Image: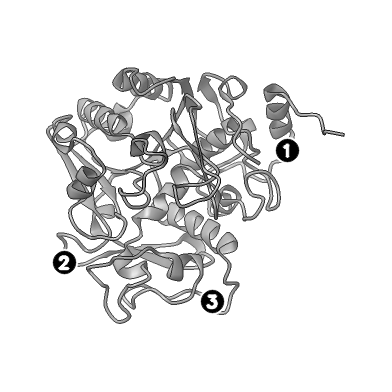
């Protein structure tokens, strides 16, 4: 006999009934949800209205250097069903242009779009051109826009070190491109997707891409960084088969469990604590389900038609996870976290923010009305 399914509102009520583990001091700011059926809708007006709902963009970026981590996971050559990358697993270029325009209008002193581009430490603009984007048009969105590949040392003479609060579980600190040290406000511009290792990839998981392959890559140097990396970060981070280049601190316990479902949620939480996100933008207008990119079997293209914006990343990701039909506080073995530990609960223990929906004010469209169920 087939088990009965819960309605959107019944599922949301069950999420709210989940016992809270969050400490009262954890951040819980407002999160905005809006429906958007197509990228043809005015993205400037959409984002501007959403920022107004959470207190305005000017208070967050005026006079500041704003660094926007986009999501360009995997090679530009890997398309899903021949569709444009921004309609499946990449950040959409229209949203990059819209945010650049709004950030400049709100008084941002400097706007940098960054990614540790797959397989190269070359110019990010070239990577974006390979993705089929009109880079000149994006640069024209505001007078102070830059595109920077943070997969290596870049234009700097040295890297920057960020300590993990409390010492972390995997790495006590992370060594990153110095651009992240020069950043006043870090923005995570993410896609709403499942993730093979972390269950979901949203604003928090997107920040894994700030780690440079020159240090944490499979072909990173041993004594020194490899400033011409061509591989990903599976051996060092996911599997723990080797240590990062010696410029970075080694793992706290190289004899600990070598399993990606345990390691990666912890690394995500550590990075978010070491280099916190100041603004989270999650695109669920068009995306994919079943995984993070075309290399995952069972991927499907979907149109949830929703956007989510907030300041605190844990708050925003919790709301987005609920919109995906999952309980953001589920333990390992349930829902989105069927195979992995819950990155949000781990981040809570580091004081990054709260994933407790009862403590987060949702503005705009409600979670039940925005809900689009993902697999699981």
- Residue lying at 32% horizontally and 64% vertically, measured from the top left: 213
Q: Which residue is mark 3?
A: 253
Q: Which residue is mark 1?
A: 18
Task: Give the left or right position of residue 97, taking residue 240 as reference.
Answer: left
| Quadrant housing the N terminus | top right
Which type of secondary structure does the marked residue at label 3 adopt? loop
Q: Nearer the viewer, residue 374 or 295?
A: 295
Colour setting: one colour
Question: Spatial distance from mark 3 to mark 2, Cα to Cα?
Answer: 30 Å
Q: Which residue is mark 2?
A: 157
Of callouts 3 and 2, the N-terminal one:
2
Above-or-below relation of 83 to 331? above
- Residue lying at 27% horizontally and 48% vertically, measured from the top left: 114
Of callouts 1 and 3, the N-terminal one:
1
Place of residue 79 in the rendered image (x, y in percent of width and height, measured from the top left): 37, 44
Query: Image quadrant of residue 285?
Result: top left
Above-or-below relation of 53 to 65? above
Q: Do the residues bearing badges 1 and 3 touch, measured as CB atoms within 8 Å?
A: no
Task: Give the left or right position of residue 345, taking residue 286 as reference.
Answer: right
Q: Nearer the viewer, residue 297 or 210?
A: 297
- Residue lying at 44% horizontally and 42% vertically, measured from the top left: 203
């Amino acid at each position: 006999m087939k088990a009965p399914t819960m309605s959107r509102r019944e599922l949301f009520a069950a999420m709210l009934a989940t016992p809270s583990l969050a400490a009262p001091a954890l951040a819980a700011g407002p999160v905005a949800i809006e429906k958007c059926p197509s990228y043809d809708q005015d993205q400037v007006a959409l984002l501007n209205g959403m920022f107004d709902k959470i207190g305005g963009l000017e208070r967050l970026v005026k006079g500041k250097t704003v660094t926007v981590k986009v999501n360009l996971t995997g090679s530009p050559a890997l398309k899903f069903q021949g569709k444009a990358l921004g309609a499946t697993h990449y950040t959409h270029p229209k949203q990059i242009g819209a945010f650049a325009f709004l950030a400049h209008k709100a008084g941002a002193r400097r706007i940098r779009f960054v990614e540790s581009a797959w397989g190269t430490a070359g110019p990010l603009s070239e990577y974006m051109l390979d993705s089929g984007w009109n880079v000149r048009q994006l640069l024209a969105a505001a007078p102070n826009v830059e595109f920077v590949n943070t997969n290596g040392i870049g234009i700097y003479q040295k890297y920057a070190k960020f300590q993990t609060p409390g010492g972390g579980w995997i790495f006590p600190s992370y060594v990153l491109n110095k651009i992240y040290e020069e950043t006043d406000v870090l923005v995570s511009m993410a896609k709403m997707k499942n993730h093979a290792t972390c269950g979901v990839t949203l604003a928090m998981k997107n920040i894994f891409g700030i780690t440079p392959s020159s240090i944490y890559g499979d072909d990173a140097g041993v004594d020194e960084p490899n400033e011409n990396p061509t591989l990903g970060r599976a051996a060092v981070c996911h599997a723990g088969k080797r240590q990062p280049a010696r410029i970075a601190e080694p793992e706290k316990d190289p004899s600990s469990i070598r399993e990606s479902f345990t390691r990666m949620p912890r690394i995500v939480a550590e990075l978010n604590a070491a280099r916190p996100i100041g603004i989270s933008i999650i695109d669920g207008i068009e995306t994919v389900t079943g995984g993070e990119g075309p290399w995952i079997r069972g991927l499907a293209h979907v149109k949830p038609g929703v956007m989510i914006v907030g300041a605190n990343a844990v708050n925003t990701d919790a709301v987005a996870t609920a919109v995906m039909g999952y309980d953001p506080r589920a333990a390992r073995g349930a829902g989105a976290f069927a195979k992995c530990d819950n990155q949000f609960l781990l981040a809570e223990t580091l004081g990054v923010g709260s994933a407790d929906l009862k403590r987060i004010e949702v503005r705009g469209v409600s979670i039940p009305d925005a809900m689009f169920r993902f697999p699981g």
